[in-house]
Image: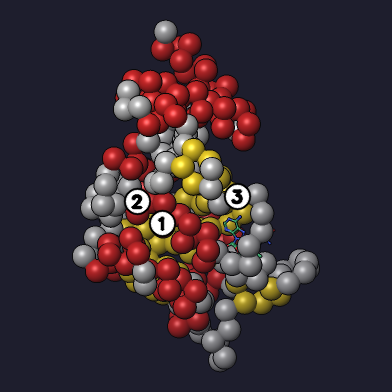
């Protein structure tokens, strides 16, 4: 998988790949990283990339020219590149999207700054637009890293143990059951005794019950989905 980050602030993105799982994936060429700075494509005298909003309104908007030229350059290099814009004005990014996008060969993440990107750029180049949640960030870099991290986990060879994926939250409507590590008793608190007895069918039932409790408390709408699915399967 190749990721191209279209950003004014490459430094904000690069650091994330300098440690742990994604560093290993880059070192073993499972992931290739590219960066494109719209400022390098600016026609203006001082490499400007933003201007005041036409029609009024607070703040600056990223102008079309540098981004048009950067994205045209990107597409001329790889016509299969899948271009994603990060913006709060979009569908929410979900685990299913991460799995689906892991099948692509090249994804470009376009990060906005200031009050966002001139809509004509999005209309012209977006294959998809995503929001990572109902809050406003100062720029799209963090959002693109969130997506990139989550997509990468679903690419073969990135995770040491592929089984980790199948039991995670959002693989089913239920959130994951609580996990415990050693020691079995820590500061007088023991892990649930059923976890210790080695009866795997009982452990599975307990984990399912605990998953349901967590989901009911934190995400009741997901529990409803789970119950609907179960009654449909019956
Ligand atoms: N004026 C915009 C609005 O109200 O929708 C917010 C612009 S925000 C300050 C600057 C940039 O941060 C956006 O262009 C986008 O790339 C990124 N951004 C902010 N919040 C985001 C979110 N929840 N999901 C994805 N990207 C986001």
Ligand 1: quadrant of the figure: bottom right
Single out the mark in the foreground, 1 or 3.
1
**Residue 167 in sight from this viewpoint:** yes
Q: Position of residue 188 (x, y in %)?
A: 54, 43
151, 107: nearer the viewer = 151
Above/below status of 61 relative to 83: below
Callout 2 secondary element? loop
Q: Is residue 89 toward the left or the right of residue 227 in the image?
A: right
Asked if the residues shown at circle 2 and circle 3 are in contact, with their CB atoms under 8 angstroms apart, the answer is no
User: First in sequence: mark 1 or mark 3?
Assistant: 3
Q: Residue at x 46, y 15 (%)?
A: 230
Q: Measuring 24% from the left and 60% from the top, which residue is drawn there?
A: 30
Q: Which mark is residue 133?
A: 3
Mark 2 → mark 1, Cα distance in angstroms: 7 Å
Where does label 2 land, which residue? 153
Nearer the N terminus, badge 2 or badge 3?
A: 3
The residue nearer to you, when weighing 139 against 81, is: 139
If the image is split into quadrants, where does the N terminus sit? bottom left
Q: Where residue 149 is drawn, which disc sits there? A: 1
**Residues marked 1 and 3 touching at CB (< 8 Å):** no
69 to 87, vertically: above or below: below
Is the Cβ of the residue at disc 2 closer than 8 Å to that at disc 1? yes
Residue, far front: 188
Kindly report which numbered mark, 2 or 3, lies closer to the viewer in this rendering. 2
Q: Residues within 10 Å of mark 3 (few under 14, many from 20)?
A: some
In this view, the residue farthest toward the left is 28
Residue pictured at 53% horizontal, 41% vertical: 189
Where in the figure is residue 222, as x and y percent of width and height? 56, 29
The image quarter containing residue 215 is top right
Would you place residue 197 above or below residue 148 in this image? above
């Amino acid at each position: 998988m190749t990721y191209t980050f279209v950003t004014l602030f490459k430094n904000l993105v690069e650091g994330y790949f300098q440690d742990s799982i994604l560093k290993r994936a880059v070192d073993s060429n499972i992931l290739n990283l590219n960066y494109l700075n719209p400022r390098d494509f600016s026609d203006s005298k001082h490499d400007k990339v933003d201007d005041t909003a036409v029609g009024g309104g607070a703040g600056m908007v990223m102008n079309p020219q540098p981004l048009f030229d950067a994205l045209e350059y990107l597409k001329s290099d790889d016509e299969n590149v899948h271009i994603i814009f990060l913006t709060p004005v979009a569908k929410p990014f979900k685990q299913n999207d991460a799995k689906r996008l892991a099948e692509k060969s090249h994804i470009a993440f376009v990060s906005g700054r200031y009050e966002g990107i001139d809509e004509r750029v999005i209309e012209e180049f977006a294959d998809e637009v995503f929001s990572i949640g109902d809050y406003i960030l100062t720029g799209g870099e963090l959002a693109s890293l969130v997506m990139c991290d989550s997509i990468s986990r679903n690419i073969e060879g990135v995770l040491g143990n592929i089984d980790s994926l199948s039991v995670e939250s959002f693989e089913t409507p239920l959130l994951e059951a609580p996990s415990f590590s050693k020691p079995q008793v820590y500061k007088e608190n023991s892990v649930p005794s059923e976890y210790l007895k080695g009866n795997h069918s009982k452990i599975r039932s307990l984990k399912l019950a605990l998953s349901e409790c967590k989901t009911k408390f934190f995400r009741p709408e997901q529990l409803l989905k789970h119950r609907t699915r179960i009654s449909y399967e019956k």
